[in-house]
Amino acid sequence: MSEPRWLDDLEMAAWQSFVEAGHRVDRALERQLKDEAGLSHPQYEILVHLSAAPGGELRMAELAEELITSKSGITYQVAQLEKLGLVRRRACPEQPRGVYAVLTEQGEQRLRGAAPAHVERVREVLIDVLDREQLAVLAEALGTVGRRLRAHDRP
Amino acid sequence: MSEPRWLDDLEMAAWQSFVEAGHRVDRALERQLKDEAGLSHPQYEILVHLSAAPGGELRMAELAEELITSKSGITYQVAQLEKLGLVRRRACPEQPRGVYAVLTEQGEQRLRGAAPAHVERVREVLIDVLDREQLAVLAEALGTVGRRLRAHDRP
DNA sequence: CGAGGGCAGTTCAAATTTGAACCACTTCGA
DNA sequence: TCGAAGTGGTTCAAATTTGAACTGCCCTCG
């Protein structure tokens, strides 16, 4: 391999900011959710995705896909949510081994209760700190980054 | 509390991109490091920060600070790196309970060996996907986000 | 002096995450 | 029609992460 192309100052700054902001925002929201809603971030995300899905249900594999985590991780967290009564499992009639995770009435209420404070915190740490122009660039740039990796991860 | 201010389309797009890109980039680099250098991302980061520090050493608490993780997490990972011979512990002469983590010669070599492929991957997934303008906005915007949280987390 | 409050790390148990192995059941291809 | 390769989840042990409790030692007030 030839001489590596090291990062210049701008690239380094972008990279480090990305990493630091990612970690800190994660931590901040993790704490907020645990404290104010009694849910871990992964658990909250599961509820959000189920709530957004038609019928309030998704296949296990789809959840893993959307949360960008492993299949076994989903199995574990859905089991936790089931214990809490916020999610229910349902066999998938079509596919033989398929399983749906379904948002329960209780899960919906819990989500509705938790969402406002969560969104408020998301604003505090990220959204309201930036102007519209910055948000637009962020969405565009990181959207590209995400899509590329999503496409490349799949196969 | 009054009616929550939900996110509009742009804000939502920025937020989701930020989260998805964060997760996917993390995963991509995790794999790259594990496969090509036999190090976990936290371990690699420890080596990087030590290498950047004057004398190749940092206090445990400083490491925790810079890596944005818990004290016990650092104790654990430094222990792992010690087993691998990449880092060494040294009592801090000044402070009574202080401990320095010191990069060993071996650790330096391991880092030098791992860095080029890692940087290349960072370019692939993030840096080279964006143009200079986007990088500048990213650095500026996420820099602000990170600094605000850093300042607020400290106390 | 002497008790309380901090500080810097470590230790510990509990929760989570991961990847690999596995299971039951299809669907092909020869 | 048999067996090989998939699918879609689950299970399992091992690695990691977390927060809370703990250890010694310093400092400072009363």
Image (tube, coloured by chain):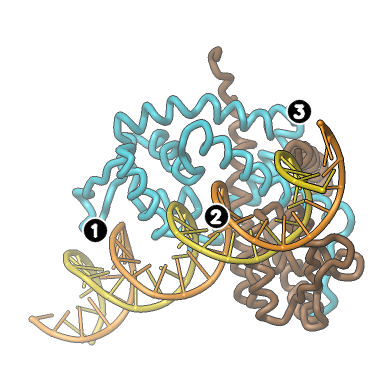
Chain colours: A brown, B cyan, C orange, D yellow
- Answer whether labels 2 and 1 touch (C-beta < 8 Å): no
Q: Residue at x 76, y 28 (%)?
A: B131
Q: Are marks 2 and 3 on the same chain?
A: yes
Question: Please, which residue is most extreme toward the top here?
Answer: A2
Chain under numbered label 2: B
Q: Residues within 10 Å of mark 1 (few under 14, many from 20)?
A: few
Q: Position of residue A137 (x, y in %)?
A: 80, 41
Percent across and percent down for residue A26 are 62, 58
Q: Tell me what residue is drawn at x 61 percent, y 42 percent.
A: A17
* Front residue (pair C19, A133): C19
Q: Residue at x 24, y 58 (%)?
A: B97
Amino acid of disc 3 = Asp
Q: Is residue A34 above or below residue A74?
A: below
Residue B87 lies left or right of residue A102; in this view the side is: left
Label 2: state its secondary structure. helix
Earlier along the polypeptide chain: callout 2 or callout 3? 3
Sequence-wise first label, 2 or 1: 1
Q: Amino acid at mark 1?
A: Arg
Q: Which residue is mark 1?
A: B97
- The residue that label 3 is drawn on is B131
For residue A6, side relative to residue A48 (left or right) = left
Q: CA distance from mark 2 to mark 1?
A: 25 Å
Secondary structure under tag 3 reads: loop
Numbered tag placed on residue B150 in the rendering: 2
Examine the image and state in which quarter residue A27 appears: bottom right
Residue B32 appears in the figure = yes
